[in-house]
Amino acid sequence: MCDAKFSFKYILNYKKPVFWVIVAVFIAFCAAAVAFAANPTKNDVNNEMNAEYISEDYKISLKYPVHWKSNPDYEERFEGEGGFFQVGAINGGNMSIDEIAKTEAFHKLNPYGSQPDIINLTIDGQEARLTLPSVDQPAEMHNQAALIVKYPQAVIIRDTAYHYLILWADKAHIEPIGETLIFLDKRLVNKISSDSASEDIHVPQKKIRL
């Protein structure tokens, strides 16, 4: 009789931890699912790249998520749920790409946080530098990262020569978008004056509605 009671009690005690283990596993599974949804994999992001942006001014084409739309208040900016991108150009005629990248990354306002990473890349055969923000990046920057690529030949935009393309995008999309970037005509040769101002930067401006 004692043995039966002991066995019965043992069985009950054995089932209790199993129940809580199941609950713990379920909670862990839900947490993982939420984390996965909030942080899509690189493959998921790459699969989004099914819309094409082409600019005759900047002499480039690139791919971006089809559900992103042009922001009517800005030139050359597309955004949507989960991210954004914007295109600009830097003169930099008398500066190396490393100098350009450091100037952008370590701006006195710390737009990429206090310790951004600068990574050497090659985009469409051209030297490139990727700036990724540090954890203390201001929240209002919305995880902005930057990709600077040296033009095969400088381009002329509104009578000014630009030697570097700059692409701003959120951290999750900057590399997948950058990997699709193509210069429209590498054979294009522009004659550039040697005294171009090295700090000039062409940034798409906010449109003013009258």
Image: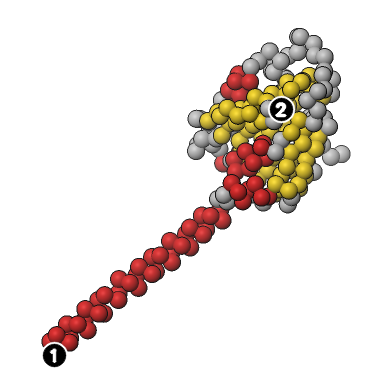
Query: Which of the two residues, 89 or 210, is positioned nearer the viewer here?
Result: 89
Give the labeled residue for mark 2: 165
Q: Which of the image's four quarters has the C terminus?
A: top right
Give the labeled residue for mark 1: 1
Query: Which of the two residues, 11 or 23, is positioned nearer the viewer here?
Result: 11
Question: Marks 1 and 2, how far apart in space?
Answer: 85 Å
> Looking at the image, can residue 205 be seen?
no
- Amino acid carrying label 2: it is Leu
Neighbour class for label 2 at 10 Å: few (<14), some, many (≥20)? many
Badge nearest the viewer, 1 or 2: 1
Farthest residue, direction right: 210
Instruction: Classify residue 147 as left or right of residue 75.
Output: left
Farthest residue, direction top: 194
> Which numbered disc flags the more N-terminal residue, 1 or 2?
1
Q: Which of the image's four quarters has the N terminus?
A: bottom left
Q: Residue at x 77, y 36 (%)?
A: 61
Instruction: Classify residue 84 as left or right of residue 160.
Output: left
> Looking at the image, can residue 42 be seen?
yes
- Amino acid carrying label 1: it is Met
